[in-house]
Amino acid sequence: MQTNKRIYLSPPHMSGKEQEYIAEAFRSNWIAPLGPLVNSFEARLAEYAGVKSAAAVSSGTAAIHLALRLAGVKKGDAVFCPSFTFVATANPIVYEQAEPVFIDSEWETWNMSPAALERALRDAKRCGRLPKAVIAVNLYGQSAKMDELLRLCDAYGVCLIEDAAESLGSTYKGRQSGTFGRFGIYSFNGNKIITTSGGGMLVSDDEAAIEKAKFLASQARDAAVHYQHSELGYNYRLSNILAGVGISQLEVLEERVRARREIFHRYKEALETYPGIRMMPELEGTVSNRWLTALTLDNGVTPEEAVACLAEQNIEARPLWKPLHTQPLFSSSVFYPHSDHERVSENLFSRGICLPSGSDLSIEEQQRVIDALAQLFETKGEKTWTAAMS
Ligand SMILES: *Cc1c(COP(=O)(O)O)cnc(C)c1O
């Protein structure tokens, strides 16, 4: 039945022009990885973000891995990373046999807590083991407190890498998200705000470093006809065909941001009228692309109940990211809470969900999500509801 068509969390949304670029790749037989569309995609994204240089790669994860290599991360080094994020932020640290140290979130952005970072850096300095890099993440499109994080990284001389996989098109004090650290990374995975079906981008103002990234990403071939290698490389470059998809997606990025922000505001209008429902904040001076609408429930309804209730209506929703320091994979890693009595990431995980936020979500589909939640809140969240009403 059409009325119960599955609603996905964040499905790909094509612009309609992708096929033209793909056809161009076929016409010119640039089917191999690399080619003119890759160069053009890199140039256009660099211009959009306002950075000097960009390297298109096969995923956001690959871009993070390259950034860590360029920051000189080696076996046994520490790398600081938010706990409240997708596992792909931290995995490349482990690829290099370095050790992730997890930093908690703070309430205003849900991202890396400058207070926790400061304590972690102070401890690390005292032990003579400063991290090789700090990775900041801009979750669900909301920029972290970049000024505070950068000030700390500068004070301790540590390289900041900005994982902007979820925040392409967002701004912090008027500047594009992903351009604050020495390196920034974007993802074009199928669920992100724009997609190449799979892909990523490493950006930096350090043009030499980006050249080095391109070298590492294409098997680290030295300048010789006989395939000479003196460094360990990867096969991480983006294909020319997918770059064509990326170019056409980049052309509609601003529209996509607008659509997701409108979706967020419709949810906000409808759901914040219920007691205990609070939308993810937007820090003053920042504009979030609202990649996913995220909110917390303080009305007696658990994230599991909300997700299950929506699933019954054929609607995909998710709890917020499970903090990495609570994942079995990282059970032996160190964690710095926001304060002695506050573990913000754990608190958010226990109370929050993400709602379907695809930029092609229709008003009718969104109403289905809202109606399902409203019904749940009015029944399960009843006590809070009547108490607040009386
Ligand atoms: C999606 C995502 C990544 C990884 O990007 P891929 O392109 O899927 O490899 C990294 N970090 C965050 C925060 C993400 O959401």
Image (spheres, rainbow, N blue to C red):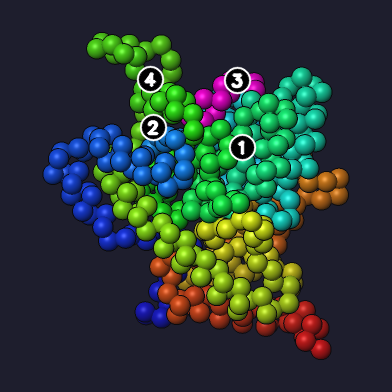
Return the residue at label 2.
236
Magenta stretch encompasses residue 305: no
Tell me the CA gap for discs 1 and 4: 25 Å
Residue projecting furthest to the right? 340
Q: Which residue is mark 4?
A: 220
Type of amino acid at the residue the image marks with label 1:
Ile
Residue stretch rendered in magenta on the structure = 65-78
What residue is shown with label 3?
75
User: What is the distance, in whole Å, between disc 4 and disc 3 at their CAs?
Assistant: 20 Å
Residue 46 in the image: state x and y as whole percent.
Answer: 42, 41
Choose mark 4 or mark 3, whichever is in front: 4
The residue under label 4 is which amino acid type?
Answer: Ala
Query: Nearer the N terminus, badge 2 or badge 3?
Result: 3
Q: Position of residue 362 (x, y in %)?
A: 42, 74
Q: Quadrant of residue 378?
A: bottom right
Q: Taking 63 as reference, is 306 left or right?
A: right
Where disc 2 sits, the SS reads loop
- Image vertical order of residue 203 relative to residue 22, above or below: above
Real-space Cα separation, disc 4 to disc 2, in angstroms:
11 Å
Mark 2 / mark 1, whichever is N-terminal: 1
